[in-house]
Image (cartoon, helix red, strand yellow):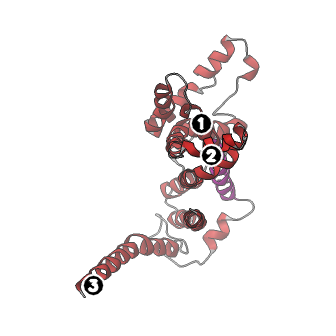
Amino acid sequence: MRNKIYPLYFTFGTLALYLIFFVVPGLMGFYYSLTDWNSYSDTINFIGLDNFKVLFAADEKYVSYIINTLDFTVSTVILKTALGLIFALIVNEGIKMKGFHRVLIFMPSIVPMLVVGLIFKSILNPATGLLNTALRFVGLDVLTQKWLVDANWAFKSIIGVDTWKGVGYIMIILLAGLQAISRSYYEAAEIDGANAWHKFRFVTLPLLMPALVVTTVLNLLHGLKVFEVVYVLTNGGPGYATDVLYTAIFKEFSMGRYGVGTALSSILFLFMTIVGYFVVRLMAREEARD
């Protein structure tokens, strides 16, 4: 009986903590998103879905925040996964000084995003930045751009900086997955006459799928809650061209529009819940396959 009761204690304790720290704050946030809560009034009135109507109005800027967040998430997931896999395959082979190359690629991921943002804000300065200066020096003036000032390039620059910082971390996870694959699979494939592409397609990729699922989860969650790199590089500018959900939430709370801010938070919470649900289903399917 004692062995059966102890697991119940842990179950109810975990459930209570989950309710207190996750469910209750989530429900409270959703409730406040249905009110006119702000810093200009002492009373909080229930207004229903008015805040959400404002967010999704055709003439409002909030829809662009959602689109920017999804655009950033999809772009960084694809870029980090593709580049991380390429780098992992390269440094996993018998190249010279591969330990040095692994450290070199991984190092940016341990630098705080605030520091990375400040460095690249200087590098991408259109007038005195290192990038444009180097392009002018080699006679490629046509390639110089107003990287963080032009609306057409600012968001692309943010995606590029975030990819540069995070690709090393993804590479390390995929490299661990590659090193866990037994060489006997490749030897068997060679005996069957498989070339390099066939070995990658039918051996490496399927066996690396659990690691790819993990990196995809990490990239998705990072993309949906991106804040620092946008805030440091452009603060959402020029105009609102690079604003994402977290920067929009920050600005709404800074202006005292708490009801609209919590409505944006509820939308972000919904996105992350949906992504989490499908990711858990996918991971469960992969485990069942294994």
Residue 18 x, y percent position in the rendering? 39, 73
Answer above or below: position of 207 versus 101: below
- Spatial CA distance of label 2 from label 1 is 10 Å
Q: Of the two numbered discs 2 and 1 on the same chain, state the one appearing first in sequence.
A: 1
- Asked whether the viewer can see residue 72, the reply is no
Instruction: Identify which amino acid the numbered label 2 is placed on.
Output: Thr
Q: Which residues are magenta?
A: 60-79
**Whole-percent x, y for residue 71 in the image:** 68, 50
The residue pinned by badge 2 equals 204
Residue ID for mark 1: 89
Label 1 vs label 3, nearer the camera: 1
The disc, 1 or 3, on the residue closer to the chain's N-terminal end is 3
Q: Residues within 10 Å of mark 3 (few under 14, many from 20)?
A: few
Q: Main secondary structure of the magenta part?
A: helix
Number of the front mark, 2 or 1: 2
In the image, residue 61 lies in the stretch drawn in magenta: yes
* Towards the viewer: 66 or 288: 288
